[in-house]
């Protein structure tokens, strides 16, 4: 089914993204996989190709577009590639919107040009060792060193599972600034790479996505100037809620695009692989499995496209994003698991992409809000 949500401009960006992958990622894939880390130069290369900051204002070097379909195109192509990639979806879809929507003019002048060129790598630090899905359980604290609006903040605490934890230059840290104010007691502070007391722990040894620098972050009496408060003091929790729908849609987009490519390669394998005198795809059971996967991915893409239109129209809801996130990631998990099964023993070998995809994709039903949290959001909206 031809997708109707993209026009010629989006397809032109798709072609540019493919060139970026071929010229700037593929030649280094083996090295980055061995290093288990994508080099920072990949972000700078992405900036040169115009793949960063197209949603940022033009006066700061950005593209000045609010069309999330451009984000979707880049996300789809990178997810379909399957090799080591820089976390452009994190930069474009998740963290940059905080700077765009919450940053004041001084902050935008200071930070946006580097974000657009890829010289400034972003991260966001929400999750803590004792606070994952329950953001209200965050304990990282920030207290004023003195009185008045211009007093510095002193940050203490730890974060974990932070994507770009090693490469990042600016980290949006969710801090508890008023322990007695409940959801109104959180503030977003931007911690910069060289600030004293800010240290990075080990690069975490994950089940998949070994090339992504997921790390622990530690803050010990880190002095953060008042000029680094992002958004309004005490509104951090609400700022997170406002930005999470686009993050969840981004995850859904990447999940389906990645699973679609896994399915395509499995379809070809089913045609080529022979057993009992015929291709394994010719057996009715296997043919039915591949047909089911194709249908499920098509249906998922159609809902994603509906959500993309809602973003363009400015009316995507948190509930719609939650539906997209849980459905698409669970569908991708099911499809890729089925692809492993169709590969037989070869599906368990890491030299085959299907095995790597199985490991890399498993996190998608967990990060950005677990499937269970997504269903709870939807259920509460039903009045339950």
Image (spheres, rainbow, N blue to C red):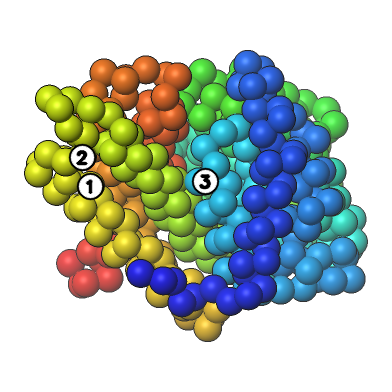
Query: At x 23% / y 23%, what residue is drawn?
Result: 344
- Distance from Cα at disc 1 to Cα at disc 3: 20 Å
Query: At x 21% / y 34%, what residue is drawn?
Result: 279
Going by the image, does 375 lie left or right of 309? left
- Distance from Cα at disc 1 to Cα at disc 2: 8 Å
Quarter holding the C terminus is bottom left
| Foreground of the two, 265 or 254 | 265
Going by the image, does 132 lie left or right of 147? left
Question: Upstream in the sequence, badge 2 or badge 3?
Answer: 3
Disc 3 target residue: 79
Identify the image quadrant of residue 338.
top left
Disc 1 target residue: 290
Going by the image, does 76 lie left or right of 3? right
Query: At x 25% / y 50%, what residue is drawn?
Result: 293
Residue 182 image position (x, y, % from top left):
47, 54
Disc 2 target residue: 281
Residue 363 image position (x, y, % from top left):
41, 36
Q: Secondary structure at mark 3?
A: helix
Residue 221 versus residue 300 in the image, above or below: above
* Image label count: 3
Residue 351 image position (x, y, % from top left):
45, 19
Residue 126 image position (x, y, % from top left):
55, 43
Quarter holding the N terminus is bottom left
Front label number (1 vs 2)? 2
- Distance from Cα at disc 2 to Cα at disc 3: 25 Å
Question: Upstream in the sequence, badge 1 or badge 2?
Answer: 2
Residue 53 versus residue 153 in the image, above or below: below
Going by the image, does 126 lie left or right of 363? right
Front label number (1 vs 3)? 1
Disc 1 + disc 2, Cβ < 8 Å? yes
């Amino acid at each position: 089914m031809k997708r109707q949500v993209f026009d010629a401009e989006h397809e032109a960006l798709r072609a540019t993204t493919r060139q970026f992958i071929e010229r700037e990622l593929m030649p280094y894939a083996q090295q980055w996989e061995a290093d288990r880390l994508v080099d920072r130069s990949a972000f700078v290369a992405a900036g040169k190709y115009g793949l960063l900051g197209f949603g940022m204002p033009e006066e700061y070097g950005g593209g000045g577009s609010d069309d999330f379909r451009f984000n979707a195109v880049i996300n789809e192509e990178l997810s379909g590639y399957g090799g080591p990639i820089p976390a452009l979806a994190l930069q474009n879809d998740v963290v940059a919107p905080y700077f765009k929507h919450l940053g004041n003019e001084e902050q935008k002048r200071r930070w946006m040009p580097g974000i657009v060129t890829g010289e400034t790598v972003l991260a966001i630090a929400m999750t803590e060792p004792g606070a994952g899905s329950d953001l209200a359980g965050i304990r990282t604290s920030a207290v004023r060193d003195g009185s008045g609006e211009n007093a510095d903040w002193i940050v203490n605490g730890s974060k974990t599972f932070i994507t770009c934890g090693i490469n990042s230059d600016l980290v949006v840290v969710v801090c508890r600034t008023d322990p007695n104010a409940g959801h109104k007691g959180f503030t977003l502070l931007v911690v910069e790479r060289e600030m004293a007391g800010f240290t990075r722990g080990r690069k975490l040894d994950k089940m998949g996505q070994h090339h992504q620098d997921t790390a622990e972050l530690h803050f010990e009496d880190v002095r953060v100037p008042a000029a680094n408060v992002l958004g309004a003091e005490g509104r951090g929790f609400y700022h997170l809620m406002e930005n999470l729908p686009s993050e969840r849609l981004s995850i859904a987009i990447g999940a389906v695009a990645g699973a679609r490519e896994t399915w395509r390669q499995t379809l070809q394998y089913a045609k080529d692989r022979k057993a009992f005198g015929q291709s394994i795809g010719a057996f009715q059971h296997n043919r039915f499995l591949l047909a089911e996967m194709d249908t499920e991915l098509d249906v998922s893409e159609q809902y994603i496209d509906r959500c993309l239109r809602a973003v363009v129209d400015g009316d995507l809801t948190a509930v719609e994003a939650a539906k997209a996130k849980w459905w698409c990631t669970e569908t991708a998990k099911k499809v890729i698991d089925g692809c492993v099964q169709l590969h037989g023993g070869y599906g368990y070998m890491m030299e085959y992409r299907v095995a790597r995809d199985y490991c890399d994709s498993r996190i998608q039903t967990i990060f950005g809000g677990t499937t269970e949290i997504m269903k709870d959001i939807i259920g509460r909206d039903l009045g339950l």
